[in-house]
Image (cartoon, rainbow, N blue to C red):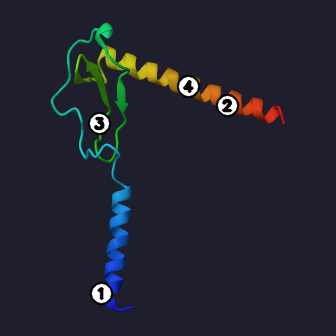
Amino acid sequence: MNSTSSIFLLLSCLLVLCVQGEPSTGSRKCKCLNGYIGRVRPELLKSEPRVYQPSSFCPELEIIIVLGTKEKCVNPESRFGQHVLSRQERKRAARSTTASQSNTENSTSL
């Protein structure tokens, strides 16, 4: 194998590794760059709030809601932001409890 082939192979491998590390949304920055909305009337929410944990692409915790047809950012430190985060934590805890109960039932039925 000549040196040109070796270099081409090395660059191809590096390219594959870089592409695999890309986020699925294609975004390489924070989503909430234009500030937060002040108050939220929960009855106007069109879907569940989305929570994005800090990552290498954005060091901030972000909460995004859909009001009407627009996505808006909620301050994670606001009363509503804290409510969203605590609700998400309760759901996560319930899922892990359900999963561990299911695993226990499966192991005892054998």
Q: Earlier in the sequence, mark 3 or mark 4?
A: 3
Indicate which disc, 2 or 1, sits on the residue closer to the N terminus.
Answer: 1
Question: What secondary structure is marked by label 2?
Answer: helix
Q: Residues within 10 Å of mark 3 (few under 14, many from 20)?
A: some
Left or right of 28, for residue 87: right
Q: CA distance from mark 3 to mark 4?
A: 23 Å
Residue mark closest to the camera, 2 vs 1 = 1
Q: Residues within 10 Å of mark 4 (few under 14, many from 20)?
A: few
Q: Are marks 2 and 3 in contact (CB under 8 Å)?
A: no
Cα distance, mark 2 to mark 1?
A: 54 Å
Residue receiving disc 2: 100
Q: Quadrant of the N terminus?
A: bottom left
Furthest toward the bottom, the residue is 2
Residue receiving disc 4 = 93
As helix, strand or loop, the secondary structure at mark 4 comes to helix
Identity, as a three-letter code, of the amino acid under mark 2: Ser
Instruction: Indicate which label's residue lies in the foreground, 4 or 1.
Output: 1
Mark 1, other Cα within 10 Å: few <14 / some 14–19 / many ≥20: few
Q: Which residue is mark 3?
A: 60
The one of 23 and 97 positioned closer to us in this rendering:
23
| Residue at horizontal 32 percent and vertical 89 percent from the top | 3
Q: Is residue 86 above or below residue 22?
A: above
Q: Amino acid at mark 4?
A: Ala
Return the disc, 3 or 1, that comes first in the chain's sequence.
1
Mark 3 lies on a secondary structure that is: loop
Q: Residue at x 29, y 26 (%)?
A: 64
Question: For this view, does 48 lie left or right of residue 100?
Answer: left
